[in-house]
Structures are given as structure tokens and as C-alpha cells.
Amino acid sequence: MDNSKIYLVRSPSKLITDNLAGYGWPQVNFSQAQDAVGLMALFADKGINPGRQRNQIKRFFSIQEGDLVVVPLHRAAAFGIATGKRSYATGVGYGENRIGVEYFRHEDGSVVRVPRSELPEALSTRLKIRMSVVSLDEFKDDITRIINQIQDKGAASFDSHIQQLEADALTTLREQLLNNLRSGKTTLESGGIGLEKLVAELLRTEGYAAKILAKTAFEGNADADIEAFREDRFTSNKLLIQVKHHTGNTGHHALRQLQLLDKEDDVQRWLITTGDVQQEMVEEAEGQGIGVMDGDRFVEWVVERADQLSQRTLNRLGLSTTPSLLV
């Protein structure tokens, strides 16, 4: 473990069952490359410029046998040791390119889920980063201690059973909420304004001052629905957000509206939709510095911040803050 590197991989959790961690880019089969130069050649052959994702791509490709992999889960994290075996398969979005990982498991075969509340604060905060592949080498001492605890005590100190039940219940909740949003089974205001108001309220729970823009705020086909600011002693952030209430795939038109906005160094552009977004479009957007939040990630945000939303908004969404039994 002394020479191993440590990586956060924001992998689809369903791949954990098969001892895999996955990354996206379905157009390129990483396992066909022998080295990083060859990998970039595969991208060039496809006419793809990975842009700002280049370092993350190389980082995922560089995971070797014996390296440690940390996969963020709901209020928890899974830890494992990479086998170094690369593979490719479709069927799981954002997880087509894969690396084998032997996750730490209980005697019954279930994966050990270490609650974030039991992680050092700095590490727990780092797991919230939106990047898909990140080095965690600076947390080596903390992660080594956690793994030693798992190996020595068989994870007895981690209440993984309740963690799993909670995660299963929240998965069901998120799926139903997304279905309700898409099918109009909430009482949010119609015409898209209700969703825009919800996004603005969510931003305020994150410390932003947010306002909904007039439809005439931009010239031509350029458009954004929400403008948000957040400033503190060290940083200054401005967001321009396009919000789409879609039931199926969100197409390139929404992305084009953001691409046509004047590019400013201190402004982050985001597309937030209740729909699905094809991986190719996500990668095109991120290559131009535009963030994308699809329906699954949007409802995850809603549920995560539900305790800070107004009672009126919770009622409109059909959400309750009343505790319920998991068993």
C-alpha cells in the first residue's frame, strides 16, 4: 500500500456489485489503448477533443493494480483495491469504461459502506467534488487508517445495514420524485416557471443570491433562465443557468443557448434539466466549460437539500420531512 495511489472515482453505484468502477466516454474504448499517448490517439481518431476532461481521462486510465479506489455513495463511501483489469461495456450510463476493483465486503458479501460522518471532515468534504476522477493522495494516512479498521474489525463499527436500507429507500424516493416532476404530478407552477423557482430556491440553500431572468434578458438565441451570485472572503462566483422541464432527452438546443452567451472568465454556465442527457452532449458541454445536471442528479440535489426548502415547496413536491422506519 506504500506505493499505491488513491483515486476518487464517481462511478455508477450499480457497477460495485460486479467489482467494477466506471467512467463515461462511450465513444472510446479505453481498454484498446496501451498507454496514455495511444488513448489520446483514440480520441483524435474519433474527432473528439476532450478539452478540460483530458486530465481526468488520463487519471482514470492510469489506475493500476494495487491502487486504492474510493467511490462516493449516498452519505457513505465504498473502498476497494484496483485489479488493474480494464474493460468496456454499454448499458450503464457514465460507466462504459471500467476498471476492476475488489471492494471491501462483509462476510455476507455486501459492500462495506463507510458513513461520511465517520470520515475526517476534510476527506468527507472532498468527496462532494463534482469531478469524476480525482486524486486523493493527500488523504493517504486517513484512508489507510480506515482500510486497516475495515480489515482488522471486519467493518463491525460501520452500521452498513442501516446505511444500505437508507440508500435503498432514498433511491426509490428519487425515482418517484423524478417521475412526478416529469409527468406533472407535482403542484409546481406550470410553464416552466415553477421549476425555475425551485432551482432558485435550491441555489439559495447553497448560499447564492438567485433571481429569475426576464425572457428578454439576452439578444438573439442566447438564453439563460437564472442568474446567481455567491461571494465570500476568498471567492466570487456567478452562475448563468438554463432550466429545462423535459420528460425525455434534452437536446442540443438548450446547450446552444448557453454557448451563445458572452463568455466571461468569472461566469459558470449550467444546464439543469429534468430530462435525460446523452453522454456525448455532456462531454461536449464540459469540454466548453458548461456544467450539466440531468434529471437523476437534479432530484438527488432536491432530496439532499429538502430539509432547507420551504414547507410550501415541499408540499408542492409532495415531500415529507417526517421520519419513517426503514425496518
Image (tube, rainbow, N blue to C red):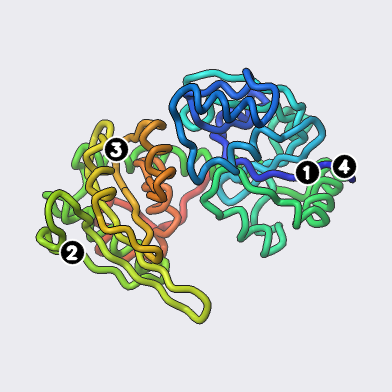
Q: Mark 4: which secondary structure?
A: loop
Mark in the foreground, 1 or 4: 1
297 displayed left or right of 84: left
15 displayed left or right of 281: right
Mark earlier in primary sequence (3, 4): 4
Residue at position x 61%, y 53% from top? 127
Mark earlier in primary sequence (1, 3): 1
Horizontal and vertical percent position of residue 135? 68, 49
Q: Amino acid at mark 1?
A: Lys
Mark earlier in primary sequence (4, 2): 4
Q: How far apart in space, not on screen, are marks 1 and 3 (Cα)?
A: 36 Å
Q: Give above or below for 34 relative to 296.
A: above
Q: How far apart in space, not on screen, are marks 1 and 2 (Cα)?
A: 46 Å
Dots 3 and 4: beta carbons under 8 Å? no
Residue, disc 4: 1
Mark in the foreground, 1 or 3: 1
Q: Mark 3: which secondary structure?
A: loop
Mark in the foreground, 3 or 4: 4
Q: Amino acid at mark 2?
A: Leu
Residue at position x 49%, y 29% from top? 25
Residue, disc 3: 275
Q: How far apart in space, not on screen, are marks 3 and 2 (Cα)?
A: 22 Å
Q: Residues within 10 Å of mark 2 (few under 14, many from 20)?
A: some
Horizontal and vertical percent position of residue 216? 10, 61
Q: Mark 2: which secondary structure?
A: loop
Residue 240 figure quarter = bottom left
Horizontal and vertical percent position of residue 228? 32, 67
Residue, disc 1: 5
Q: How far apart in space, not on screen, are marks 4 and 2 (Cα)?
A: 52 Å
Residue 258 numbered mark, or none: none
Q: Amino acid at mark 3?
A: Gly
